[in-house]
Image (cartoon, grey):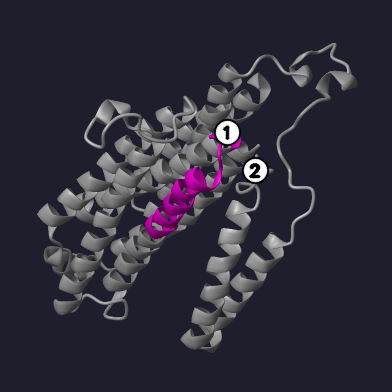
Amino acid sequence: MRVETKLFLYLFVFFVPVTLIYGFWSKWSEPIGVTALVLTALLFALSGFYLWMTGKKLPLRPEDNASGEIEDAEGNYGYFVASSWTPLWLAGSGAIMFAGLAVGWWLFIIGAFFGVVAVCLWVFESFHGEYSI
Amino acid sequence: MVAVGTIVWLSSELMFFAGLFAVYFQLRSVRGDLWATQTEKLNLPFASVNCLVLVISSVWCQLGVWKAERGQKARTGKLLDLKGWGMREWYVLTYLFGAFFIAGQVMEYAELVHENVTLSSDAYGSVFYMATGFHGLHVTGGLIAFLLIIARTFTTRRYTHANATGAVVTSYYWHFVDVVWIALFATIYILR
């Protein structure tokens, strides 16, 4: 994941001097831009650091190999539920809750009730019973 | 996959809080007079203790993560035998510390409302409750996530890799919320 790490860390290195230039140019009198630039730099640092940490844990991937073949990348990519309606229930509950913010708290509470049920259904969908992962 | 998705989402969360920080600094630069009077009402010793509790909860969370990564979901010894604690016990402790923090926040809000700092009192009140309130909602969301992750250890027979991943990404979120609070605390209570 060296390429991905570099992609983010180069931008971090770029935004640190940009922040300083911006700060000195505006005589540190304009706080919004400075805050935004500092946090932009930190955002790239966070993503870059994470990719670097992950890259250290993983062996070299097929896409890191310049002479790699497509079929090198086959295999298990993670666990995905074959079919699930629970995200739809949760989205519906969320829609009712947000409508409740505009309409009235009574509707929000009804939506929150459905939301609790939907979250539990989703969280435990693959984590209960005979075929839990 | 789950871990990468969580990090991407946390990056967007960072930008959400960046917006709140920008609002804070903008209003502070425009209405310095409000800041001079309203920040006097903040209770720094109380908030410092509360902040410390949240930071310590992150330590307990990480101890739980190390147990989860080794696949130990529950304690092996007696309740007071800390070395034998599993992910479940450490996460319950994290939950209690997080709940303490939220309770402290509620008390602080009550105190400030008595001193006429409310969401609609002035620009300072608005940005104070928006920033700390959104953070408080995130902590509350984290507490719910801890409950669900702890519950998962009871509904599955084996503590699988997928279970551990759920625990680990919850800890990512918790550490993130913790770091955001350190920044908010430094901005609101120390820098003023």
Q: Is residue A22 visible?
A: no
> Local crowd at mark 2 within 10 Å, few (<14), some, or many (≥20)?
some
Identify the amino acid type marked 2: Ser
- Observer-nearest residue: A122 or B122? A122
Residue B64 shown left or right of residue B78 in the figure: right
Label 2 sits on a secondary structure element that is loop
Q: Chain of mark 2?
A: A
Residue B45 shown left or right of residue B156 in the figure: left
Numbered mark located on residue A132 in the image: 2
Q: Chain of mark 1?
A: B
Residue A27 placement (x, y as % from top left): 34, 46
Residue designated by label 1: B160
The answer to the question of whether label 2 and label 1 lie on touching residues, with beta carbons closer than 8 A, is yes
Picture layout, residue B134 above or below residue B113:
above
Residue B53 placement (x, y as % from top left): 22, 46
Which residues are the magenta region?
Answer: B138-162
- Observer-nearest residue: B78 or A103? B78
When asked about the image quadrant of residue A67, the answer is: top right
Residue A37 shown left or right of residue A97 in the figure: left
Q: Main secondary structure of the magenta part?
A: helix
